[in-house]
């Protein structure tokens, strides 16, 4: 036993019991050491429960990755990674305003194929890797629960499915988060910590920071967990490792102030603490119990209240008898990560606590729930809890993908335009960046015209993306050959882009003054209208 541990005797004995249980399951559950992933892959695939879950997951994820349309964030990713590794790193820092590693990896991955499906396939494989690592995480942290329940609840959570079908960084974030949990246990929490695992943790920590800045919150939370466990010498070793990681991260650290200013430079006011807590609560609810049918909202509240009260009773009565250092790590990570996200929200703007930005909270939140499950003495409690989680997840999946489309529904928009358009009917697109995913599908006879200008993919939220006046629209139309008696207008639902007001009102006022709407067709978070120019007398009357 690590001589730095200062836990009550009952907790130490429970921890030893858990470790013995994990050892007894060694041959049953795969992955003996952090470095045994490749060597144990065959055994993993032969595990009937895991192979079955993985097969079902892959069928779902691959189908959606193939079927769903491209949207503006993914179009941005494809543009960033389309011209080689060096350009991908440069644009990741200057245009995406993010850490560059994901974009560098995807640029290399796309050398094999330039399709949208291939770009998303990288994310699918990252989630497969995360599920494999979760088997080891479950066995280390929660040995009294069979890993299949944890893998089942996480694999088919809509958040996981969404991350797998995005040509964005989030699936890689989940994989790195799982690796950090796993290696942290092996290197700092296990009864016999391994130095090799500490080196592995440091390497993954550095890669994590070069991938997604918010992953630094996990590192901070793990350090806090060691302090709460009073493992002073281990905490000192952890701090030393993080100092080395900081040195490795220093070249990128100097980029962050400029990137933050690109996001928040025009933010006029900060959000309130109450609003931040409410938004954080919504994010957690959607991750744990996503609601697909509105009628389930009341059910979700009931489940959360009942489980919260029961968990409170169990924590008070049984935490000393059944909680282990692993529980402390999980719960501390969840609480500290939530606090860090809330702080980011308060110091920046609401956009920094959107669903995708809470990706780092997903694994700590789900693992925290399963850690609470271990406090139940009734074995069926775990199965019942997993069934509740899966019920909300599956109903949400059915609702979300009953109409399989991402924001904009650009593939159907393009098909509609090509079937309904005639020659000399230019297509105006607002906001301008929406032209990128639409042009991927559109092969019609008319010209696509981004308003107020084509996206340059050089500077994020450039002021020239804002429609400033009707004069801009007149100037755009003056450059188009023909009479333009009829034109198409394609708009998405966004009137703001982080800190910029795009001035949708200017466009709508122009349409109302000079055009009549002949046809209007709604799609998923986008609209297509065929406009006919009003007679000059009517124009003058307005």
Image (cartoon, rainbow, N blue to C red):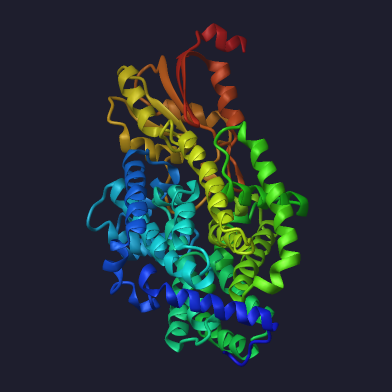
* Total marks placed: 0
Q: Is residue 276 above or below residue 542?
A: below
Residue located 36% across and 20% down the image: 425
Is residue 111 shown left or right of residue 362?
left
**Residue 68 in the image, given as x and y percentages of width and height:** 37, 39
Closest to the observer, 320 or 237: 320
Between residues 192 and 249, which one lies in front from this camera angle?
192
Could one spot residue 452 in this view of the protein? no
Q: Which part of the image, by quadrant, shows the N terminus?
A: bottom right
In this rendering, the answer to whether 161 lies above or below 447 is below
Quick check: can you spot residue 242? yes
Looking at the image, residue 39 lies above or below residue 419: below
Q: Nearer the viewer, residue 133 or 376?
A: 376
Q: Quadrant of residue 293?
A: top right
Residue 346 higher or lower than 191, as above or below: above
Instruction: Look at the image and tell me in which quarter the C terminus lies.
Output: top right
The front one of 24 and 54 is 24
From the viewer's perspective, tell me whether residue 391 is left or right of residue 84: right
Residue depicted at 59% across the width and 88% down the height: 234
Give the residue at x 45% y 41%.
433
Across and down, in percent, residue 336 comes to: 66, 67
Q: Residue 409: x percent and y percent? A: 42, 33
Residue 75 location (% of width, % of height): 39, 46
The answer to whether residue 525 is left or right of residue 117 is right
């Amino acid at each position: 036993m690590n001589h730095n541990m200062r836990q009550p005797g009952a907790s130490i004995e429970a921890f030893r019991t858990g470790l013995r249980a994990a050892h007894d399951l060694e041959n049953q559950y795969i992955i003996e050491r952090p470095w045994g992933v490749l060597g144990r892959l065959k055994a993993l695939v032969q595990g009937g429960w895991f192979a079955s879950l993985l097969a079902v997951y892959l069928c779902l994820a691959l189908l959606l990755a193939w079927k769903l349309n491209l949207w503006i964030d993914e179009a941005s990713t494809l543009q960033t990674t389309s011209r080689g590794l060096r350009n991908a790193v440069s644009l990741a820092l200057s245009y995406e305003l993010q850490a560059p590693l994901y974009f560098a990896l995807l640029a290399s991955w796309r050398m094999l194929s330039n399709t949208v499906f291939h770009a998303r396939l990288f994310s699918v494989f990252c989630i497969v890797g995360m599920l494999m690592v979760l088997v080891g995480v479950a066995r280390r942290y929660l040995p009294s629960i069979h890993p299949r329940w944890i893998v089942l609840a996480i694999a088919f959570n809509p958040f996981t499915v969404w991350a797998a079908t995005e040509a964005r960084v989030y699936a890689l974030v989940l994989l790195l988060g799982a690796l950090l949990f796993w290696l942290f246990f092996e290197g700092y929490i296990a009864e016999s910590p391994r130095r090799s695992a500490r080196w592995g943790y440091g390497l993954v920590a550095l890669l994590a920071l070069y991938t997604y800045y918010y992953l630094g919150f996990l590192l901070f939370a793990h350090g806090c967990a060691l302090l709460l466990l009073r493992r002073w010498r281990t905490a000192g070793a952890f701090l030393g490792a993080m100092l080395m990681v900081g040195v490795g991260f220093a070249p990128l650290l100097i980029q962050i102030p400029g990137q933050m200013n690109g996001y928040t430079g025009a933010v006029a006011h900060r959000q309130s603490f109450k609003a931040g807590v409410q938004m954080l609560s919504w994010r957690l609810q959607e991750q744990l119990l996503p609601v697909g049918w509105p009628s389930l909202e009341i059910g979700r509240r009931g489940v959360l209240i009942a489980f919260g009260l029961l968990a409170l009773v169990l924590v008070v009565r049984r935490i000393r008898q059944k909680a282990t250092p692993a529980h402390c790590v999980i719960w501390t990570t969840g609480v500290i990560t939530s606090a860090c996200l809330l702080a980011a929200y308060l110091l920046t703007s609401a956009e920094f606590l959107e669903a995708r930005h809470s990706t780092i909270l997903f694994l700590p939140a789900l693992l925290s729930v399963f850690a609470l499950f271990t406090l139940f003495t009734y074995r069926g409690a775990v199965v019942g809890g997993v069934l509740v989680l899966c019920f909300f997840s599956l109903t949400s999946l059915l609702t979300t993908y009953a109409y399989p489309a991402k924001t904009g529904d650009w593939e159907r928009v393009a098909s509609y335009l090509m079937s309904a358009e005639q020659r000399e009917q230019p297509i105006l697109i607002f906001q301008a960046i929406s032209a990128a995913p639409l042009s991927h599908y559109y092969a019609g006879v008319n010209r696509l015209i981004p308003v107020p200008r084509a996206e340059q993919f050089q500077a994020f939220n450039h002021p020239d993306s804002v429609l400033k006046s009707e004069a801009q629209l007149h100037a755009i139309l003056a450059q188009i050959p023909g009479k333009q008696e009829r034109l198409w207008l394609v708009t998405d639902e966004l009137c703001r882009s982080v800190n910029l007001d795009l001035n949708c009102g200017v466009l709508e006022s122009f349409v109302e003054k000079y055009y009549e709407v002949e046809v209007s067709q709604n799609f998923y978070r986008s609209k297509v209208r065929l406009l006919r120019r009003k007679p000059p007398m009517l124009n003058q009357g307005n």
